[in-house]
Image: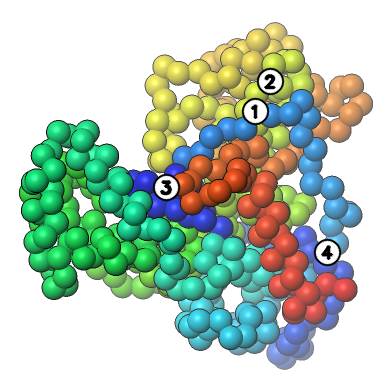
Amino acid sequence: MYRYLSVAAVLGLSACASNVAPLVQPVPAPAPVLRPAPMPDPQSLLPAPVVKPVTPAPLVAPVSKPVPLPLQPAYNNEQEGSALLDKLLPRGIPARREWHGDIMTAFTHLKIPYAPQYFCAVLAVAEQESGFNPDPVVPNLSRIVWGQIEERRQKYFIPSLVVDAAMLKKSPNGQTYKERVNALRTKKQMNALFEDMIRELPFGQTIFEHKNPIRDGGPMQVSVAFAETQVRAWPYPYSYTSLRDEVFSLRGSVYFGTAILLQYPISYPDMVYRFADYNAGRYASRNAAFQLAVQHLSGQKLALDGDIMLYSDKMNRVLSGATSDTQRALNGLAGRLRLSPDEMARDLRQEKLAAFSQTEVYKRVFALAEQSGKAAPRQIIPQIVLISPKFTHQLTTEWFARRVDGRYEKCMQRGGFRP
């Protein structure tokens, strides 16, 4: 998932088909169970990405595709699921056996159905984020880190001679810190470097503000904050010393990436909206459609970014005393909606949960929007610009979602679930 790239977070740049017979016949031969993933909701929240809203067009149309066809059968048997995944997982990728085992572990422990659409969704995100490289390389990483160290040195008025001398000190792996920065190729290496710098260098805690600034990583670009929230809501299947290190491992990134993508209930008609949510935050596609409905009713241009309220941090804590543009537009509709601003604010606090679609403000906004006889989409791809020094041209959440969706379709074809 994309994140703002600095030393504080380096780079991250990450239904269905006709009824095709299952790849492996269930044993002892009952018909496979069709189910659109009644997945449990651990109420863990995906931290809001550091992104910049796009100035929205007057109307953002939902993805136009044919009427969704039935989901492919899901298997309850782990052996059959393993055979299905083996067919879908590309040949010749690095650490293919490890990818297979870690994906199966994630699906089993997260209670995700063994179905092609879900396997292909995870594989598509992994391919987009890392090309299936367990420790993906980030171009120009050492240059970026040196630039950020210099920026922070100036911010805290630390003499350059002090920094230069400290960087010549030998680190725990035997190399000097300067040598390690110059040799940086992956975020996993950088995460370990910062851990050592914070612990050992005299200025480390000052310029890094007593915490490792790397916020996400691994082959599926998983947020450390999400992992911390997820393990409190759902048991993690591996023993570990450092949860942060787990995020940068293949098994941890696969596990938490699968949880972010699939372990929350939503009734999207197309997988592309889950891919958009993976980039922009859980329920962002649903919430952006709500913002679009409010925009039409109020006549005010709104950022269709999926964040209805204003948040103070990555843990989705509402910014105290602040009112978003969407809230102000809703307050102007209070009479037509027959809800007070306090009642609406109460409902809006559930925007990161499945329950938001059952609130009065949600139901009344869409009921009012459809009085004209026009259908109001219940999901659109959030309009967000992705910010990173790596990008040479403007990229958006829509670009990410459609790129992943293209990989998803190829995966389904590879398994024989598309014409």
Residue found at the far bottom of this picture:
28
Residue on which the image places disc 1: 55
Residues under numbered marks 2 and 1 in contact, where contact means CB atoms less than 8 Å apart: yes
Residue found at the far right of this picture:
373
Depth check, front residue: 34 or 256: 256
Residue on which the image places disc 4: 70
- Which is closer to the viewer, label 4 or label 1? 1
Mark 2 or 1 closer to N-term?
Answer: 1
On the rendered structure, is 236 left or right of 102? left
Residue 243 seen in the current view: no
Task: Check disc 2: other Cα within 10 Å, few if <14, some if 14-19, many if 20+.
Answer: some
Residue 207 percent coordinates (x, y):
19, 42
Residue at 52 percent across and 66 percent down: it is: 130
The quarter in which the C terminus is drawn is bottom right
- Which is closer to the viewer, label 2 or label 4? 2
Structural distance between the alpha carbons of marks 3 and 1: 22 Å
Depth check, front residue: 294 or 299: 299
